Amino acid sequence: MAQMTTRAVPAVDAVAAPRARSPLHRFLHAREASTFLALVVLFALGTLIAPGFVGTDNFLTVGQQIAQIGIMAVGVTFVIINAEIDLSVGSIYGLGAVVCGLLMTSDVAWPVAALGGIAAGALAGLVNGLMTVGFGIPSFIVTLGTLSVYRGVTLLLSGGSPISLPASDPNVAAFNLLGQGKLFGLVPMQLVIFALVAVLGTIVLSRSRYGFNTYAVGGSAEAARLCGIDTGRVKIAAFTLSGTLAGLAGVLGLSFLSYVQGVTGTGMELTAISAVIIGGAALFGGSGTMLGTVIGVAFIGVLQNILNLRGISSFWQTVATGTVIILAVAADTWLRRRSGRR
């Protein structure tokens, strides 16, 4: 009996050991941990080489600069976890801004105009989802096509001319508080809105049935279908959400600048996708977190801020961002192969 008791104790300890892991241990083994550590290193580097980097004003400026990309990246996260891609969010950003601008210049109340811009983004995202699921066309091809289609529609709506909002109009002044206002006179409203969107995205992705279905579909669409999940509906909802948030970002962009033109938003899709990938989401779907996306957005924002403070050309900034993307994808591929061998 004594021997049996002695052998049973290690078994209990082995089962209990995983449960005893601290939150720090779990975080250090999470996919986004490497990106967070890279962000810490980048922060330390900025402190050493970039004059004016450390300071509340600069950090809040960075937060305001990343807010629009961050909001778009939250929507793109759902699409990528579904093992799809959305290359049209930059064009949808411009479409939402132009629709809102046209409504504002037609003396429509700013809340209605803002909702109009967001609705235009939601409709564009819905079309992406319906075409991808309904026709079975790869989302890369669909959104590569709608990138041009939505850009063309935006140019047609604006007549190829820029839209400027008169600051003297009380309706415009109230609208501009969304993009230019500061909470408590300190925190940019754009950053506040981004934080709210990120929190809601985290809750939906990690705490809801839809979030569970998203991971299931991205991991194996066929297995998810056999489990009774409507995979088509999950993917359509992801594209619609992506378009909605891109439209919201476009509305905030217009509110910040009081100006928009047909080509606004060009290239923003690459930055949003980059943030999600840098944050640890796999291009093959099935993995990724909203926390990782936020860290990825912060990483890009801090990197660009350091380069700006150092007076580095915007061309080299593009090179630096592209290099980081390649390294992030290479690291993800290496981790997947290593996990597969295990």
Image (cartoon, rainbow, N blue to C red):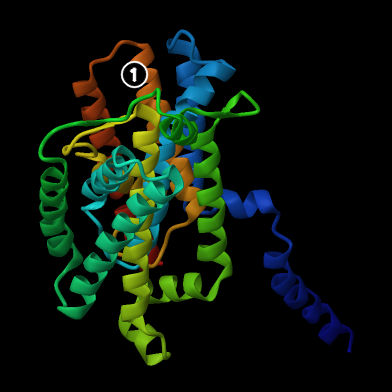
Foreground of the two, 102 or 91: 102
Residue on which disc 1 sits: 307
- Locate residue 78: give its quadrant: bottom left
- What amino acid is at disc 1? Leu
User: Which of the two residues, 70 or 317, is positioned nearer the viewer here?
Assistant: 70
Q: Check disc 1: other Cα within 10 Å, few if <14, some if 14-19, many if 20+.
A: some
Q: Is residue 184 above or below residue 297?
A: above
Up/down of 75 relative to 258, above or below = below
**Which quadrant: the N terminus?**
bottom right
Foreground residue among 40 and 273? 273
* Image location (x, y in percent) of residue 5: 85, 83
- Residue at left offset 44%, top offset 37%: 67
Horizontal side of 299 relative to 284 (left or right) equals right
Q: Image quadrant of residue 308?
A: top left
Residue 29 percent location from the top left of the image: 54, 53
Above/below status of 162 relative to 52: below
Q: Residue 43, position in %: x, y?
A: 49, 25
Q: Position of residue 270 (x, y in %)?
A: 24, 43
How many discs appear?
A: 1
Could you tell me if residue 336 is visible in this image? no
- Please, what secondary structure does the residue beneath circle 1 have? helix
Residue extending farthest top: 51
Question: At 43% across and 58% down in the image, what residue appears?
Answer: 288
Q: Is residue 114 left or right of residue 313?
A: right
Q: Nearer the viewer, residue 263 or 135?
A: 263
Q: Residue furthest front?
A: 107
Answer yes or no: is residue 145 visible: yes
Q: Going 70% across and 71% down the picture, which residue do you hit?
A: 14
Quarter of the image that includes the C terminus = bottom left
